[in-house]
Image: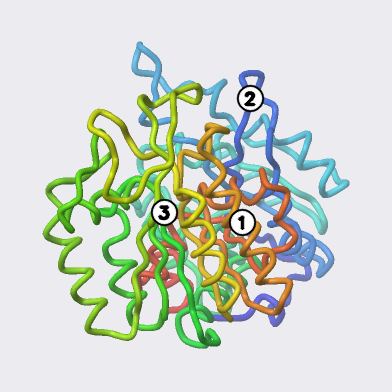
Amino acid sequence: MAAIQDINFEGKKVLVRVDFNVPLDENGTITDDTRMRRALPTLKHILDAGGSLIIMSHLGRPQKKKTAEGEIDVQRFTLKHLVDHLEELLELHVEFIDDPISSAAKEVCSSLQRGEIVLLENTRFHSGESSGDEELAKNFAALGDIYVNDAFGTAHRAHASTTTVAKFFTKEHKAFGFLMADELFNGNKMMTEAEQPVTAILGGAKVSDKIQLIENLMNFADNILIGGGMSYTFYKSLGYSVGNSICEDEFIPLATALLEKAASTNTKIYLPEDINAADKFDNDAATKIVSKDKIPANWQGLDIGPKTMEIYKDVLLNSKSILWNGPVGVFEMPSFAKGTNSLAESIAEATENGAYSLIGGGDSVSAIAEAGLTEKMSFISTGGGAMLELLEGKTLPGVAAIEV
């Protein structure tokens, strides 16, 4: 594999896989362009080095959300929505190609001159994308001289445009973009070079989504702070009543095993000491702060309580390395966002005091952004699922394809 800094892009047509899977409103207007901005260093480097750009990305899940007639909803999922804003960001004209595997597309790409840019239509409009279809990948590859993968958010998918396509380029003609390299550096740093004490905060609804992560964290984390819906599966494994709180009963034995394993290692697992419970799943529900073992029947826990916030804050402020993956409450509802916001503020304070903080993608990133604390974190990942699998110790297909 070549480093992007060492490749000679002069006069080369560069096929760049980015993650432009940005949120759009009902009018097709971009509501958060973070992923596009994070790709700019790679795109501008190639242009400055004399290359031309052939940009490809997915947007949403068009194959799974077809119209009633079974057709792809092109208007909803087209990357054409992104062209104007991409032109603003790059300050250059961007030509849009609506069929990347057509003869017309090949003709346009083959005639690209230094500094010219084309954006290909949504890769997921092709059914072979998600299956890693070799013929589709070969068609993509035929468009460029060099392949650069800067789409960390899809690195855990063995798709045609992220993994299979790389086999059609030699080691000297494929590389990671700057964003991909940063993501891998920071993820591996947390696992192998993090200064202790290392504290991981795990939230979200399901413990089943975090099993492998918890097990791998025990290899290097000193503390694991649990919150969110997954707390209640652990509570029930300890014999507590959880009322109507979300709980994965089938994973109770596993929760017990994880607690026992942690007790035999140097990792301490913290569960919330108190809970903000509600009589229904609603922002305007009646609420009360209760002890972890006193959740009323027919009530449900929707956030951590103030005592837990203080305990977790103390742990975080005494940590040198912090990983956060998943909110600790239903933060989309203001009434149950206090715990998540409190953690965001504590992590920001710890970072300001010299700790290294890695925000592991997904809802955690949204929570940080809503709290206005994005700039106060050491590194914020663009890939929730990809970062999760990296931290679980898995090999990411999109990474392995470039490294071979």
Residue 203's label in the rendered image is 3
Type of amino acid at the residue the image marks with label 1? Ala
Residue 52 drawn at (x, y percent): 75, 57
Q: Residue at x 24, y 79 (%)?
A: 263
Query: Does label 3 or label 1 sit earlier along the sequence?
Result: 3
Residue 25's label in the rendered image is 2
* Marks 3 and 1, how far apart at CA: 13 Å
Residue 344's label in the rendered image is 1
Q: Are marks 2 and 1 in contact (CB under 8 Å)?
A: no
Q: Is residue 223 left or right of residue 364?
A: left
Type of amino acid at the residue the image marks with label 2? Asp
Badge 2 crowding class, 10 Å Cα cut-off, few under 14, some 14 to 19, many 20 or more, is few
* Marks 3 and 2, how far apart at CA: 27 Å
* Marks 2 and 1, how far apart at CA: 27 Å
Q: Residue at x 50, y 64 (%)?
A: 312
Q: Residue at x 40, y 60 (%)?
A: 156
Residue 104 drawn at (x, y percent): 61, 37
**Count of numbered badges drawn on the protein:** 3
Residue 91 drawn at (x, y percent): 88, 46
Q: Is residue 342 above or below residue 12?
A: above
Helix, strand, or loop for circle 1? Answer: helix
Badge 1 crowding class, 10 Å Cα cut-off, few under 14, some 14 to 19, many 20 or more, is many
Type of amino acid at the residue the image marks with label 3? Gly
Q: Residue at x 58, y 53 (%)?
A: 143
| Residue closer to the observer: 391 or 122 | 391
| Residue closer to the observer: 107 or 64 | 64
Name the quadrant of the C terminus.
bottom left
